[in-house]
Amino acid sequence: MCFICERIEMIKNGTNPYFVKELETGYVVIGDHQYFKGYTLFLCKQHKTELHFLDETFRTKFLSEMADVAKAVYNAFGAEKMNYECLGNGETHLHWHLFPRKSGDMPIKGPVWWLPKDEMYDDKNRPSKEELEEMKAKLLNELNKL
C-alpha cells in the first residue's frame, strides 16, 4: 500500500490527526510540517498516478475541488499568493500540495522546494497538538463557507 493510501486509511479509521474534511473526490489534510503556515494537501480518493488516468467527470470535479481547497487555505491563513504542486515523484498517488505564501517567507525569492529539505522538514516545524487543532478549525471554517 502506498503512503497516501495509508494516510487515507488512517482517515477512514479516525486515526489521522491531520485530517480536516472529506470532499467528493478527495481528503483535505494539514501538512505534517508547517514551515509555510497553512500548508495543506488534497489527497485524491482514487489511487491514480496521473490526472489523465482519471475519468473526465471525476477529474473535472477533482480539479474544481482542489481550487476550492486552495481558496479556503488562502482565506484561512492570509496568503498573499498560493503555490500549487502536483508532482508525484516521491509518492505517485495523485495529491496536491497547497502552499500559502507571504512576502519574505523564504531567505530567497522562489519556489518552496528551494528551501533546504532539512529546514522545511525540521521537527520544529511540526505543529503542536493545540496549533494543529487551531489550524484545522480555521481551515474547516473556510471550507464550510464554499
Image: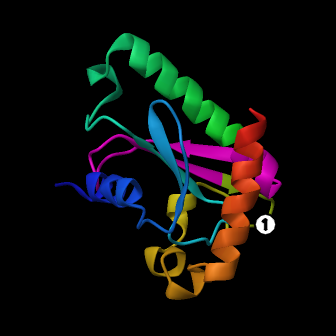
Name the residue that disc number 1 marks.
104
Q: Position of residue 114 (x, y in %)?
A: 53, 63
Q: Is residue 32 above or below residue 65?
A: below
Q: Position of residue 12 (x, y in %)?
A: 37, 53
Q: Is residue 79 visible?
A: no
Does residue 55 appear to the left or right of 19 in the view shown?
left
Q: Is residue 96 above or below residue 51?
A: below
Viewer-nearest residue: 93 or 114: 93
Specify whether residue 87 is painted magenta. Answer: yes
Mark 1 surroundings: few (<14), some (14-19) or many (≥20) residues within 10 A: few
Viewer-nearest residue: 48 or 26: 26
The kind of secondary structure element at disc 1 is: loop
Q: Quadrant of the N terminus?
A: bottom left
Q: Position of residue 139 (x, y in %)?
A: 71, 53
Determine which quarter of the picture holds residue 59: top left
Q: Is residue 133 visible?
A: yes
Query: Number of marks in the image?
Result: 1
Specify whether residue 36 is painted magenta. Answer: no
Residue at screen point 56% across, 34% down: 66
Q: From which residue to which does the magenta span run?
A: 72-99
Viewer-nearest residue: 113 or 14: 14
Q: Is residue 117 above or below residue 140?
A: below
